[in-house]
C-alpha cells in the first residue's frame, strides 16, 4: 500500500478548515475575493469543507447599512460567485450573510457545494444586550413562514431544520447553528445531532473580552462532547473591530470533547486552521452511548444530499493526518503533571476496590506472588494502600517468592528487598522440586521446554498462592494486567486466576509509569531505588532455564511483540471499534521512524489472532477494578463470545499484507 494514496475518507476522516478571512466592513466585493482566496488555500491543503464566519460576506458590524438594498443585492450576487467557486476549487463551504425572505431580513448561513446553494439556515437566537443589537435588523428564525426560497429561478431549502448529507462519506451529515445559538440554554445543535448530524458548523462573530476566549473554547469543546460530534466554529477577524468592540478571529475545531486545532487570534490577515475529523469515531460513540440513542428529537428535519469533492482533489494528497500528534502510548498522558494526577487517581481506584473486597469478606490477610517484576510490584503497592485505608497491619500481606527454572537473581533479590523494606511478610518457596515431581507423574521430560514445561510452573505457583490464602484465612490477590488479558498472555487456571484481579484495568505501558510515580511520590530511599530497578528490568515470565552465567533466555516482548504496540492496538480496537486497516494506518502515523509497516502489521496480526482466540480466558476472569475507558471484564465493558470467528479481521489483514509487500517503499527501516 502506498501511503501517498491512502483514502482518508475510506478510513472515516474528513479534512475540514475553519477560516477567519481578512475583512472590510460593508465591502462585499473585497470580502468575496478574500473568501474565494481562502477557499483556494483550503482546497490546496486537501480540505473538503471550509467554514467561514457569521455575516462574512458583508461583515457583522454593518449596523444600519443592513437596511441598504444595494448591500443586500450585492450580497446575492456574491452568493452566486461563491457557489461557482465551490465547483472550481472542488470544496464545499458554509458562509454567513444577510438574506431577505418575505420582507424580513435574516442572519443566515448558506451551505454551498457543486456550484449551487444547497440550503440557507437562519439564526435562531438574536443577542440584543450590551454591545449586541441584532433584533434591530434581523428577524429570528422562528418567525419565518417559508420553507423554500427562490434564488435565480431555483428553489432552495430555507430553515433551521436542514441537514446536509454527503453521499460519498458514510454518516457524514452536517448541521448548522449560528453564533448565539450555541450560547443559548438549548442550542439547536443538540437537536441537529439527535437528527443525525455528526459535524456541527457554527459561523460566528463573537467579540473578544477578558476571559472570553477560555469560555468560548470550553463551550465548543463541551458541546462537541455532549453531542458526540465534531464541532467547527469560525469567528470574525479583527477587521470587524469598530467603535467600542474588538474581534479576534478565533476559529477552532473540536471533536467529542477535544480541541483539534484553532487559529491564532488578533491577526488581520486571513487565518486558516485545518483538521481531519473522524466521522467514523463519532458514529461508533453514538452506537455505544444509549443515552444518546434514547434521547428524543424535538423536530423533524429535511435532508439535502450532495457529494464531497473527490479525494484525488482533496485529502488523498497526503496521508499525514492533520490532527494533534497521535500518542504512541494513548493510555499514558504526555504531560508529566497530568500523568502524575492520573497515576494517583488510578492507584486510589485500585486500592479502594481491593479495600472494599477486604472489608466485605472480613479479610485481614492476603497472599500475593511477588516475582520482582512490574505487575506483582504494582499489586503489592496497591495492596499496601488498601491495608492502610482499612488500618490493617502490613504483616497481613503475605508475599511469596517462588523461584523456578528461569528465576534470575535480579528479580529474586528485588522481590526480597522490596518485601523487607515495606515491612510485609515474606515467604520463599521453591517450585523446582514440586514441578519435577509433577513432570515425573505425567511423564513429561524436563528437557522438553514446551507449553507443558512453562504452564506447569505457572499452575504450581498458583496452587501455592491459593493454598497459603486458605492457610492464613485470606484470599489471593492477582497480579496480571489489562494487556495480558487482551492477548491471553496468562496460563489458564494459573496466573490467570485469583480472588481479586487488582491490575485488571491497567495496561502494561501504564504499569511502568505507576511504579515510576510511586518511586517519585510515595517512597524514598532504598525502597524507591528498588522500584526504579524493577522498572528497568526486562519483562519476562521467567519460565525457561537460564543460560550460562545466569543469563535470561526468555523475554516476553520478543515472543509476542512490543507492549507499546499492543496497548496502542487495544486502545483503538476496544475503545473505538476501528477496523484493522484504520488501526494499521494510525499505528503507521504514530510509530513512523520507530517501526516499519511490515513490523506493525506482523504484530497487529498476532494481536487479532490472540485477541479472538483467548477470549475464553477473559470470560472466566476474576473480579477486578475498572480504572479507565477501556476494560475487558465480561461482566461490564467487553462481552464477546468465546468462540467468535476472527475470519473477517484476518482476511483484511491478509489483504493489507499483500499491499505492503507490493509496495516495499512504505516499509522503510526505522
Image (tube, rainbow, N blue to C red):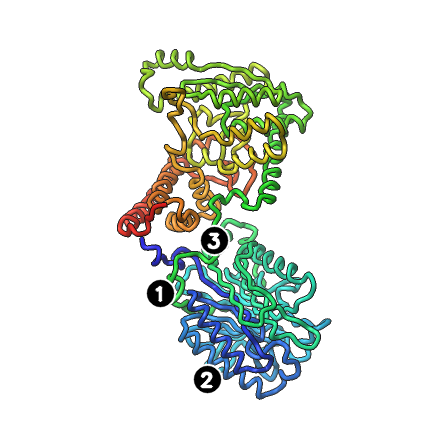
Which picture quadrant has residue 25? bottom right
The answer to whether residue 276 is seen in the rendering is: yes
Pinpoint residue 197: horizontal percent, then vertical percent. 51, 62
What crowding class fits label 1: few (fewer than 14 Cα within 10 Å), some (14-19), or many (20 or more)?
few
Element at badge 2?
loop
Q: Name the residue under label 3.
A: 281
Pinpoint residue 443: horizontal percent, then vertical percent. 32, 14
Label drawn at residue 312: 1
Pinpoint residue 617: horizontal percent, then vertical percent. 43, 31
Q: How far apart are marks 1 and 2 (CA)?
A: 33 Å
Label drawn at residue 153: 2
Q: Distance between the residues labelled 3 and 1?
A: 23 Å
The answer to whether residue 229 is seen in the rendering is: no
The numbered mark, 1 or 2, whose residue comes first in the sequence reads: 2
Q: In which quarter of the image is the C terminus?
A: top left
Question: Which mark lies nearer to you, 1 or 2?
Answer: 1
What crowding class fits label 3: few (fewer than 14 Cα within 10 Å), some (14-19), or many (20 or more)?
many
The numbered mark, 3 or 1, whose residue comes first in the sequence reads: 3
Question: Which mark lies nearer to you, 3 or 1?
Answer: 1
Q: How far apart are marks 2 and 3 (CA)?
A: 40 Å
Label drawn at residue 303: none
Element at badge 1?
helix
Query: Could you tell me if the residues under marks 2 and 3 are in contact, i.e. CB atoms within 8 Å?
Result: no
Query: Could you tell me if the residues under marks 3 and 1 are in contact, i.e. CB atoms within 8 Å?
Result: no
Instruction: Name, please, the residue furthest toward the left.
Output: 662
Element at badge 3?
helix
Establish if 36 lies above or below 622. Answer: below
Query: Is 475 left or right of 569, judged from the image as shown?
Result: right
Amino acid at each position: 500500500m502506498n501511503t501517498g494514496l491512502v483514502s482518508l475518507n475510506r478510513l472515516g476522516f474528513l479534512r475540514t478548515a475553519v477560516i477567519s478571512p481578512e475583512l472590510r466592513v460593508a465591502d462585499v466585493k473585497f470580502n468575496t475575493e478574500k473568501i474565494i482566496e481562502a477557499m483556494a488555500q483550503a482546497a490546496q491543503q486537501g480540505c473538503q469543507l471550509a467554514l467561514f464566519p457569521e455575516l462574512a460576506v458583508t461583515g457583522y458590524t454593518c449596523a444600519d447599512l443592513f437596511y441598504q438594498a444595494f448591500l443586500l443585492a450585492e450580497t446575492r450576487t456574491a452568493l452566486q460567485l461563491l457557489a461557482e467557486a465551490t465547483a472550481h476549487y472542488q470544496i464545499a463551504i458554509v458562509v454567513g450573510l444577510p438574506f431577505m425572505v418575505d420582507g424580513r431580513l435574516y442572519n443566515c448561513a448558506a451551505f454551498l457545494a457543486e456550484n449551487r446553494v444547497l440550503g440557507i439556515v437562519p439564526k435562531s437566537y438574536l443577542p440584543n444586550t450590551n454591545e449586541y443589537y441584532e433584533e434591530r435588523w434581523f428577524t429570528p428564525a422562528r418567525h419565518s413562514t417559508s420553507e423554500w426560497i427562490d434564488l435565480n429561478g431555483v428553489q432552495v431549502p430555507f430553515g433551521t431544520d436542514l441537514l446536509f448529507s454527503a453521499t460519498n462519506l458514510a454518516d457524514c451529515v452536517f448541521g448548522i447553528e449560528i453564533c448565539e445559538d450555541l450560547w443559548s440554554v438549548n442550542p439547536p445543535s443538540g437537536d441537529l445531532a439527535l437528527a443525525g448530524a455528526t459535524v456541527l458548523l457554527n459561523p460566528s462573530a463573537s467579540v473578544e473580552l477578558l476571559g472570553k476566549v477560555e469560555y468560548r473554547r470550553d463551550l465548543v469543546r463541551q458541546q462537541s462532547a455532549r453531542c458526540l460530534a465534531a464541532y467547527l466554529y469560525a469567528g470574525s477577524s479583527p477587521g470587524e473591530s469598530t467603535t467600542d468592540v474588538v474581534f479576534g478571529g478565533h476559529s477552532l475545531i473540536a471533536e467529542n470533547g477535544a480541541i483539534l486545532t484553532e487559529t491564532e487570534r488578533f491577526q488581520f490577515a486571513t487565518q486558516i486552521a485545518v483538521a481531519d475529523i473522524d466521522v467514523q469515531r463519532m458514529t461508533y460513540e453514538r452506537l455505544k452511548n444509549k443515552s444518546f440513542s434514547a434521547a428524543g428529537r424535538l423536530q423533524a428535519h429535511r435532508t439535502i444530499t450532495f457529494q464531497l469533492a473527490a479525494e484525488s482533489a482533496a485529502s488523498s494528497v497526503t496521508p499525514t493526518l492533520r490532527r494533534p500528534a497521535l500518542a504512541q502510548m494513548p493510555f499514558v498522558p504526555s504531560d508529566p503533571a497530568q500523568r502524575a494526577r492520573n497515576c494517583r487517581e488510578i492507584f486510589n481506584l485500585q486500592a479502594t476496590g481491593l479495600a472494599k473486597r477486604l472489608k466485605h469478606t472480613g479479610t485481614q490477610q492476603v497472599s500475593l506472588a511477588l516475582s520482582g517484576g512490574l505487575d506483582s510490584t504494582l499489586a503489592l503497592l496497591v495492596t499496601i494502600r488498601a491495608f492502610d485505608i482499612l488500618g490493617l497491619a502490613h504483616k497481613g500481606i503475605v508475599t511469596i517468592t517462588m523461584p523456578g527454572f528461569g528465576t534470575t537473581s535480579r528479580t529474586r533479590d528485588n522481590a526480597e528487598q522490596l518485601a523487607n523494606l515495606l515491612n510485609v511478610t515474606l515467604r520463599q518457596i521453591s517450585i523446582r522440586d514440586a514441578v519435577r515431581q509433577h513432570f515425573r507423574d505425567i511423564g513429561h521430560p524436563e528437557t522438553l521446554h514446551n507449553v507443558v514445561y512453562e504452564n506447569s510452573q505457572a499452575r504450581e505457583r498458583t496452587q501455592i498462592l491459593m493454598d497459603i490464602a486458605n492457610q492464613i484465612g485470606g484470599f489471593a490477590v492477582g497480579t496480571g494486567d489489562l494487556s495480558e488479558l487482551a492477548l491471553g498472555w496468562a496460563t489458564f487456571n494459573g496466573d490467570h486466576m485469583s480472588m481479586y484481579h487488582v491490575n485488571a484495568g491497567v495496561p502494561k505501558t501504564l504499569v511502568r509509569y505507576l511504579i515510576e510515580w510511586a518511586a517519585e511520590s510515595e517512597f524514598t530511599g532504598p525502597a524507591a531505588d528498588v522500584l526504579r530497578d524493577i522498572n528497568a528490568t526486562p519483562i519476562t515470565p521467567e519460565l525457561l532455564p537460564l543460560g550460562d552465567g545466569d543469563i535470561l533466555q526468555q523475554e516476553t516482548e520478543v515472543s509476542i511483540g512490543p507492549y507499546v504496540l499492543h496497548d496502542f492496538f487495544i486502545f483503538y480496537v476496544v475503545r473505538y471499534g476501528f477496523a484493522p486497516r484504520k488501526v494499521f494506518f494510525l499505528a503507521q502515523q504514530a510509530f513512523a521512524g520507530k517501526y516499519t509497516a511490515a513490523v506493525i502489521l506482523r504484530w497487529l496480526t498476532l494481536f487479532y489472532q490472540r485477541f479472538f482466540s483467548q477470549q475464553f480466558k477473559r470470560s472466566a476472569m476474576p473480579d477486578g477494578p475498572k480504572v479507565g475507558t477501556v476494560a475487558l471484564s465480561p461482566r461490564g465493558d467487553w462481552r464477546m463470545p468465546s468462540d467468535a470467528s476472527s475470519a473477517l479481521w484476518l482476511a483484511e489483514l491478509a489483504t493489507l499484507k499483500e499491499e505492503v509487500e507490493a509496495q516495499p517503499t512504505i516499509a522503510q527501516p526505522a
